[in-house]
């Protein structure tokens, strides 16, 4: 048995931050941001809005689109690196907010690869035959951990989330294959240094700005270009496919130059690659499900189309997933 996607949804908070807004805040330019990343604007949460609020909106849309009631949901998986609380899963908060009385769930932390990790987990649990209606969400409130005086990070990230409903497939459509990797020796290049058990929050950690995202952009860029391209090509090779067999490639949206490199490696044309980093920036675990919902809303995907997801993120973590659209 396979797991298939039966509904997609996304949520972007109302507030936006454009490149010209950033020009007024830090030493940067619209031209620099666009040419180095492809980003034009990003969305940011409002006062009091957290990851579970975005996840709730995504889950409610999934219920509406699929015609399911909250009671029918068995499991909620949430990929996020920005939970509402250090203790208490965002999945449990979403379970309560949508009234999914029969669901359990948990969070998965794999930075920008989180949604692909969570999809693999959700798909395998559906394939086990025990779970029939699984909500998989990727959402991050990056603005809660960004230093808006640090131009190395604040121009890149945005807030947002998306998700899918997974159900059993009774034909050959669904999640066909996946390849996932982790290499924790790269953890220091993209991290939030404090607030965990190694460096608990203290006056000193706050003073030193250790609760903000630290990124060695150049190193991350180098690994992202290589690993996201390699893992995309590897899954095609493993399945005796080439780029021309794909209807759509949905890569993690971090930087248009990283996406272009992966697309080139798989010999894809521009119309086979979904790029929306210009509109939303890098929403970490949110990028792939948001892009998937964009593709569905734009009527790009038809039954039996082959879709390739690929991601790279902090950890390091990376992976790809091949899906036959149901
Ligand atoms: O989500 C997964 C993880 N994240 C990523 O995949 C991000 C990977 N990294 C990147 O996307 C890129 O490395 C960045 C977009 C972060 C930076 O682009 P870059 O082309 O690697 O720039 P750089 O760090 O090499 O900096 C080039 C120059 C520097 O000036 P000097 O030293 O050459 O005078 C920077 O100080 O650009 C400067 N710079 C900026 N200038 C204007 C860095 N950030 C900015 C900025 N505006 N926001």
Image: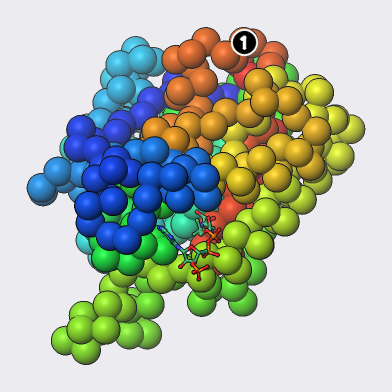
Q: Can residue 324 be seen in this snapshot?
A: no
Image quadrant holding the C terminus, namely top right
Q: Is residue 122 above or below residue 216?
A: above
User: Which corner quadrant of the image does residue 116 belong to?
Assistant: top right
Q: Position of residue 281 (x, y in %)?
A: 41, 43
For the residue pair 80 and 284, the one nearer the viewer reads as 284
Work out which residue is located at the far right of the displayed protein and give it: 240
At a point 47% along the width and 57% down the height, the residue shown is 111
- Residue 81 appears left or right of 144: right
Q: Position of residue 74 (x, y in %)?
A: 39, 34
Image quadrant holding the N terminus, namely top right
Tell me the element at label 1: loop
How many residues crowd around disc 1 within 10 Å: few (fewer than 14), some, or many (20 or more)? few
**Circle 1 residue:** 302
- Residue 25 appears left or right of 187: left
Q: Is residue 255 above or below residue 298?
A: below
For the residue pair 166 and 310, the one nearer the viewer reads as 310
At a point 39% along the width and 15% down the height, the residue shown is 66
Q: How is the image coloured?
A: rainbow
User: Which corner quadrant of the image does residue 214 belong to?
Assistant: bottom left
User: Which corner quadrant of the image does residue 211 belong to?
Assistant: bottom left
- Residue 49 appears left or right of 220: left
- Total count of labels: 1
Q: Position of residue 188 (x, y in %)?
A: 51, 77
Q: Can residue 191 be seen in this snapshot?
A: yes
Some atom of ligand 1 lies within 8 Å of the CB belonging to the residue at label 1: no
For the residue pair 280 and 9, the one nearer the viewer reads as 280
At a point 38% along the width and 77% down the height, the residue shown is 193
At a point 77% along the width and 50% down the height, the residue shown is 230
Work out which residue is located at the far left of the displayed protein and give it: 47
Q: Is residue 183 above or below residue 139?
A: below
């Amino acid at each position: 048995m396979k797991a298939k996607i039966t509904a997609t949804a996304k949520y972007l908070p109302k507030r936006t931050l454009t490149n010209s807004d950033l020009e007024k805040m830090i030493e940067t330019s619209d031209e620099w941001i666009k040419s180095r990343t492809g980003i034009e604007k990003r969305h940011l949460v409002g006062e009091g809005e957290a990851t579970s609020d975005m996840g709730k909106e995504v889950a409610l849309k999934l219920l509406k689109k699929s015609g399911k009631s909250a009671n029918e949901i068995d499991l909620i998986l949430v990929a996020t690196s920005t939970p509402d609380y250090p203790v208490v899963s965002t999945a449990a908060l979403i379970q309560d907010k949508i009234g999914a009385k029969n669901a359990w769930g948990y969070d998965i932390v794999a930075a920008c690869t989180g949604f692909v990790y969570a999809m693999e987990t959700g798909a395998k649990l559906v394939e086990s035959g025990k779970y029939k209606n699984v909500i998989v969400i990727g959402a991050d409130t990056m603005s809660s951990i960004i230093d808006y005086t640090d131009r190395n990070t604040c121009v890149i990230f945005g807030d947002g989330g998306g998700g899918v409903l997974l159900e059993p497939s009774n034909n050959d459509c669904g999640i066909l294959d996946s390849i996932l990797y982790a290499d924790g020796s790269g953890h220091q290049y993209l991290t939030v240094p404090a607030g965990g058990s190694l460096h608990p929050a203290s006056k000193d950690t706050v003073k030193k700005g250790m609760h903000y995202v630290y990124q060695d952009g150049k190193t991350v860029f180098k690994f992202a270009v290589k690993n996201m391209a390699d893992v995309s090509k590897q899954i095609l090779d493993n399945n005796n496919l080439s780029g021309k067999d794909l209807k759509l490639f949905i890569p993690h949206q971090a930087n248009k130059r990283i996406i272009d490199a992966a697309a080139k490696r798989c010999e894809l044309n521009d119309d086979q690659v979904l790029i929306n980093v210009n509109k939303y920036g890098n929403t970490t675990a949110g990028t792939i499900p948001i892009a998937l919902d964009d593709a569905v809303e734009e009527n790009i995907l038809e039954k039996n189309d082959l879709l390739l997801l690929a991601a790279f993120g902090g950890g390091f973590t990376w992976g790809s997933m091949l899906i036959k659209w149901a």
